[in-house]
Amino acid sequence: TGARGGTGIATLVFTVAAEEGTWTIPVALPIGAPDVALQSFALSDAAHGNGNGCLEAWEFQNLSCVYRNRGTADAISSVLTLSFPENSFGRAVDASVALPLIPAGGTVSFPDELLWFVKEATPPFSEIAMILTIEGSNLESRAETVRVRTCGYGLDDPVASEGSFSHRAIVGVDQWHVSGARYHSAPSSWRCGDSAAGAYSNIMESVLTLPPLCLFNNSRLTFWHRINAEA
């Protein structure tokens, strides 16, 4: 059988025939194979953008990646290709790069060799999926999807819906939700507590996270909050 995911087995069957009978002897041989996966990635607009470190519409972005070979054999003649789903806000420009040999247990990095463009009509806080496909002469094709989100300059948040905010539980349950109770500005506000009874759960720690914002000199973020907690 072929080697996948770093290991494999090849079975050789030896048959000996004689007047006394036939003997079949299977011999299992381990096969080494590469297992290459994305370890990290980073974006930069320093070379072809405005250099402010924000992911924005109408801007070129360089993509750097680090790949690790978790297998038991070197990855030979690998090629990495960048693509985007149909109707994406991203468009590949320099879409592929040939990688050097990736030794078993080792890593390979290539800074800024993939280039893509954020389309001009991309709204702030838009999610963009990037598909990274690696293949090689002794490597099965493997596609991984990473997601990034465009930045914004201002956040006028009426809390009409969850919008570009995210929330999650660190301990216990996540009770953040949009509520019509005690808002500062109509029609609603963010609330952490039971949507029916109103009280929050015991032993709970959850977070509400803003979308990425580009902050410049004299930027100011203003919010109102009210807390009703046990002493």
Image: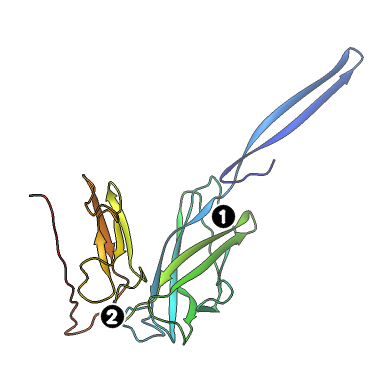
Query: Where does the image place residue 14, in percent across and percent down from the top left?
Result: 79, 27
Q: Is residue 6 left or right of residue 157?
A: right
Q: Is residue 90 above or below residue 208?
A: below
Query: Where does the image place residue 184, in percent across and percent down from the top left?
Result: 20, 74
Judged from this view, the residue extending furthest toward the left is: 231
Label 2, on which residue?
A: 156
Secondary structure beneath disc 1?
Answer: loop
Residue 110 appears anywhere in the view = no
Residue 227: assigned label? none
Q: Nearer the viewer, residue 146 or 174?
A: 174
Residue drawn at x 28%, y 80% as measured from the top left? 156
Figure coloring:
rainbow
**Residue type (three-letter) at the residue carrying disc 2:** Asp
Marks 1 and 2 sit apart, C-alpha to C-alpha, by 49 Å
Q: Nearer the viewer, residue 98 or 163?
A: 163
Q: Quadrant of residue 125?
A: bottom left
Please give the count of numbered marks on the rendered protein: 2
Q: Is residue 208 left or right of residue 35?
A: left
Residue drawn at x 23%, y 76% as measured from the top left? 185
Q: Nearer the viewer, residue 183 or 41?
A: 183
Name the N-terminal-most of marks 1 and 2: 1
Say few, some or many: other residues with alpha carbon within 10 Å of mark 1 (under 14 / 14 to 19 / 20 or more): many
Residue 28 appears anywhere in the view = yes
Q: Which circle, 1 or 2, is nearer the viewer? A: 2
Q: Is residue 123 above or below residue 109?
A: below
Q: Is residue 217 above or below residue 14?
A: below
Where, quadrant-wise, is the N terminus in this rendering?
A: top right
Q: Nearer the viewer, residue 213 or 116?
A: 213
Residue 75: assigned label? 1
Q: Is residue 205 left or right of residue 162?
A: left
